[in-house]
Image (cartoon, rainbow, N blue to C red):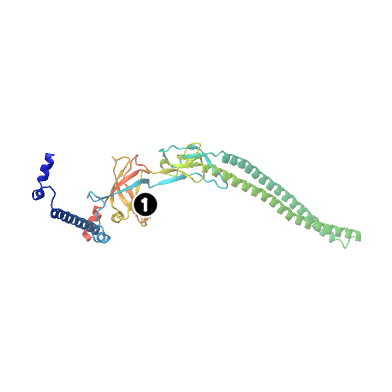
């Protein structure tokens, strides 16, 4: 109680009060209010000046007039981009599409394990081809039978042709003999002359008939042989198609490289292909990549893209192996940007960096950081300004 009284009496305003009650006079309270108002006004003015300066510094006009700030905050003259590794030489392996027939699914009976190093021509995968092999064997037997029939029919036709030609030759001889007999008609009796005339007419009719039927027989025989040849050729085509389909179901490596299995949608789930799986035709389920020549495909935003030039050097850091660093070079820059994922106003450009050297650990689809050396480009820009 005494301490609070001492604190009140220590106030100059209280000491000046004639009544000694501890309440300040009205004019002192007013001064404090004015002082507080002035302090608030000054604070508002300071905040307004700061906001105005910040808005001017970040306005579009100020950005256009001021030089672009470097993207790197370390001041080392490097620009970091994120991308993923990929092989320069690679081939996608698709499920075979059989010719001349519709097959809903194909069953894998053999597949090479991922990561296997293969040579060109090695078997990568094999699908069930029993039906194609069975068709090939059946059509091969049928083809051989038709070939024998064509040979037999041609031999029969040759024999029939020789026989008909002999008959025509005999008819021609008979006609010649009848013509000679007719030359004796002046010294023959009337009956013998009439018999010679009938013999001549008969020989002429027989020869004409043989010649006419000879052409018809040849056409009929050629038509029969042609039918067999068409059946033979059709069977041969089916046989060759079956053989081609059987070979198509055995996929071989198109180049030297490493086997990489793709993750695909199969039987209601995502996963890699295994033996016994059924795949639809035309599905890319495997890749053969050449790891000796790799590259990194990255994305650069519309501001960083202006600082990039083809030929700039870079250092590539695979995220999975922080201790590994590969030198690189900017090889390609996309001429057209693509829209951003979150805003249509943001644009990104695809850039490709070549990787110098290779390592067995450096495989496709590895995330990597790319530090691009843009210091030379910045110095050149300052010299021009």
Helix, strand or loop at label 1? It is: loop
Residue beneath the point at 22% across and 61% down: 384
Residue furthest bottom as drawn: 186
**Up/down of 71 relative to 247, above or below:** below
Q: Residue furthest front?
A: 19
* Residue with the mark numbered 1: 342
Q: Quadrant of residue 291?
A: top left
State the residue in front, 125 or 253: 125
The image position of residue 342, as x and y in percent, is: 37, 52
Indicate the position of residue 370 as horizontal and vertical percent values. 30, 47
Residue 294 visible here: no
| Up/down of 309 relative to 249, above or below | below
58 or 194: nearer the eye? 58
Category of crowding for the residue at label 1, using alpha-carbon neighbours closer than 10 angstroms: few (below 14), some (14–19), many (at least 20): few
Residue at the spot 64% in from the left edge and 49% down from the top edge: 230
Which image quadrant: the N terminus? top left
Q: Position of residue 123 (x, y in %)?
A: 47, 39
Q: Is residue 307 visible?
A: yes
* Quadrant of residue 112 within the rendered picture: top left
Asked whether, in this view, residue 185 is left or right of residue 155, the answer is right
User: For the C terminus, which image quadrant?
Assistant: bottom left
What is the quadrant of residue 57 in the picture?
A: bottom left
Q: Nearer the viewer, residue 356 or 197?
A: 356
């Amino acid at each position: 109680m005494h301490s609070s009284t001492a604190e009140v009496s220590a106030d100059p305003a209280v000491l000046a009060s004639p009544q000694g009650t501890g309440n300040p006079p009205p004019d002192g309270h007013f001064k404090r209010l004015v002082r507080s108002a002035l302090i608030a006004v000054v604070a508002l003015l300071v905040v307004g000046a700061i906001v105005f300066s910040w808005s001017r510094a970040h306005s579009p006009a100020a950005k256009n007039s001021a030089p672009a700030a470097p993207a790197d905050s370390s001041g080392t003259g490097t620009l970091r981009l994120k991308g993923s590794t990929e092989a320069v030489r690679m081939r996608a392996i698709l499920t075979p599409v059989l010719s001349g027939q519709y097959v809903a699914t194909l069953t894998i009976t053999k597949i090479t394990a991922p990561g296997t190093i293969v040579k060109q021509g090695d078997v990568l995968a094999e699908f069930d081809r029993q039906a194609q092999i069975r068709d090939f064997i059946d059509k091969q037997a049928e083809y051989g039978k038709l070939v024998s029939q064509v040979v037999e029919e041609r031999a029969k036709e040759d024999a029939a042709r020789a026989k008909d030609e002999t008959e025509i030759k005999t008819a021609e001889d008979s006609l010649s003999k009848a013509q000679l007999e007719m030359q004796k008609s002046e010294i023959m009796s009337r009956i013998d002359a009439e018999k010679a005339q009938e013999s001549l007419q008969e020989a002429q009719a027989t020869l004409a008939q043989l010649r006419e039927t000879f052409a018809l027989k040849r056409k009929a025989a050629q038509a029969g042989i042609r039918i067999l040849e068409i059946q033979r050729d059709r069977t041969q085509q089916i046989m060759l198609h079956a053989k081609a389909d059987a070979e198509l179901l055995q996929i071989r490596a198109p180049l030297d490289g490493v086997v990489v299995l793709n993750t695909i949608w199969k039987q209601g789930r995502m996963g890699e292909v295994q033996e016994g799986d059924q795949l639809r035709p035309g599905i890319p389920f495997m890749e053969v990549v050449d790891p000796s020549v790799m590259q990194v495909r990255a994305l650069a935003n519309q501001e960083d893209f202006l600082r990039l030039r083809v030929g700039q050097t870079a250092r590539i850091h695979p995220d999975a192996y922080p201790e590994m660093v590969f030198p690189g070079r900017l090889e390609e820059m996309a001429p057209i940007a693509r829209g951003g994922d979150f805003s249509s106003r943001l644009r990104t450009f695809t850039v490709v960096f070549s990787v110098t050297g290779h390592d067995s650990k450096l495989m496709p689809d590895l995330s990597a950081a790319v530090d691009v050396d843009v210091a030379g480009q910045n110095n050149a820009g300052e010299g021009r300004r």
